[in-house]
Image: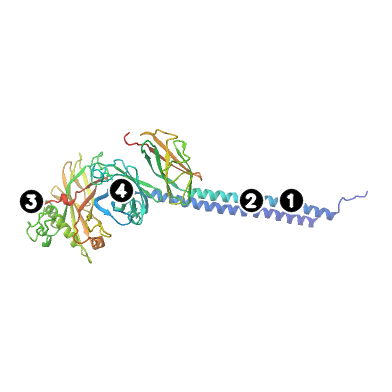
Amino acid sequence: MKHTLAVSTVIANMMMITITLGLAAILIAWTGSTYGLFTSGSQIFYAQRGQAMQERFTVENTFFNTTGTNRRLLIFVRNDGAEQVNIVAIYVNGNNFGTTGSGGTCNVPVTIPVAGVCEFNVNFQSLNPNPKTGDTLYVIVASARGNRATYTLRVFIPGT
Amino acid sequence: MRSRRAVSSMIGGIIVLTLFLSALSVMVFISQQYDTYQSTVENMNRKDIDAFSENLVPVYPGLYYNSNQTETQGTCTPYCYVYVLYVSNDAAIGTQITRLYINSTDTRPYSQGAAGQGVGCGNLCSFDASSAPQPFHFLASSAFVNPSEYSHQIIFYTNSTYTLPCSQSCGAYGLNSIAMVTARGRVFSFQWPIPPTGVATVSYLTTGVMQIAYLGSGNPGYASANEPAAVSRGSGGTSVAGVYCHSESNATKVATGSYYGNLWFVNPWATWTIFKDAFPLTGANHTQFFVVAKITNNQGGPIVITRGNVWLQLTVPQTANNPSPGAMVILTIGGPLVGTYYNGAFTPAGSQTTIASLTSALLVYRINIWSWVGNSQITQVPSGVTYSGMATMTNDQEGGGSTAYFSGSSLLDGLYVKSGC
């Protein structure tokens, strides 16, 4: 009985080595890309978390301006952190005042530099036209990094 | 076969080692990122602790205002009214004030109704730091309050039309809400005029005339016989030469306690003359004022006086030559409570003096004027300019730890003048 080999022993060995190296190259390339995505993702994550952590802003004062029939709330926001702050939304009692009224020094969205202060002028005419003395307003100022500053005030309108 | 297994083992080992090293490098890199993040977290936590450690407390009288006290420098055109904010830092960390807010709930002008003489901050006034006098700004040089600094002065300016309600005393309290914003994001506020402390909302201490006494009587130049007749409240020319005309028996009783010797009350002219003669001072030369305040305990029960402080403020009025650059002087000097004279006995400060209900006592304070106090400031007073008044303000802490505040009237209105002198 004569045994006939499909390929010679040398060729078979070379094929096995080639296949093994090929699979190894594919494995290393896959792990490399995975590790690369993982490292770059973690780098971005920690960098963003670090920036968010260094972001500090406070509502340092509010004032209810009742000139004439206007009902406006002045909100003074100061950036006392180490990163500039991008204010993207102001909520008053759950209502989003996407654009503040004229008269303030800033409109949302706005970027407040470090140590800067912005005066937002919230106009109540469209959403809450009749705030009156004694009403409680809950103000939330939100930043693009997900931080927020809150402030609670009670409305006082002189003469009422 | 053995040699082939060796090659395969080597290749396999290299692959495993490559995977292990690459995973290790990733772990090291991520650890570095995490460490950086943690250092940021710790840094911000430390900043939070610093912010929470801040503690600014207003010091009586909170604000000081004098209608003669104006500023024409910087952009104060034609002039700005000047206010001095007194604040103490009760924390062990320094604080920088970045903005002041003042909201007047009562917009009456300081003149209590006279039209055109001023308006309050009914629409919220904000004051930012400025290197030079500027309307609605405060001096940046006064923005830093050192750790544990007592009675720090923050000088701020309104314009020529804005004055805060009750600036010149109106008998009401809390007409202005004053907020101080720090660089760390904290806000400290108080009401001004500062409501009285004590039982309920009523101060349990009242004071009559607050007087200035002087130690010794050897200089005949200070006799009221030499005072010019034009001085307000100055009687002039009626005294016995060589002694102060206006001595008071109570002051002598204080001296009976063998504590400081004879105390003599003098009139405004003599006080001012003594004060001016104290400058320029050299070496260890100094002079002393003794401020004597008569207080009455209005409370139903006794109060205990243990210690206290006094402040004496000097201002120069506006004249044809003043204000001019460098001419205006605001000088504040202070001193501690020397002791309490009560029921014929003098008790030194530090020991308790129990004052029964509805009785009165004399509180004696001492102010040392040394050369470093205000030599450069006092020499800026133009020749021939007299002072506009001295305000005395004291606070006393009763034995229970609470603090009572009261202020004295101007010397021009309050100096005791002995009859028949």
B371 up-or-down from B150: above or below: below
Q: Is B67 or B367 nearer to us in this picture?
A: B67
Which amino acid type is shown beneath numbered disc 3?
A: Ser
1 or 3: mark nearer the eye: 3
Residue B150 visible: no
Q: Mark 1 sits on what residue?
A: A23
**Secondary structure found at label 4:** strand
- Residue B134 in sight: yes
Is residue B5 shown left or right of residue B383? Answer: right
Q: Residue at x 32, y 36 (%)?
A: A158
Q: Between residues B384 and B263, which one lies in front from this camera angle? A: B384
The residue that label 3 is drawn on is B419
Chain to which the residue tagged by mark 3 belongs: B
B409 is higher (above) or lower (below) than B244: above
Chain of the residue displaying label 2: A
Reading the image, the residue beneath label 4 is B58
Is B63 placed left or right of B94 in the picture? left
Inter-mark Cα distance, 1 to 4? 76 Å
Proximity of marks 3 and 2: CB atoms separated by less than 8 Å: no
Rounded to the nearest whole Å, what is the CA distance between mark 3 and mark 2?
Answer: 98 Å
Residue at mark 2: A35
Q: Position of residue B320 (x, y in %)?
A: 22, 57
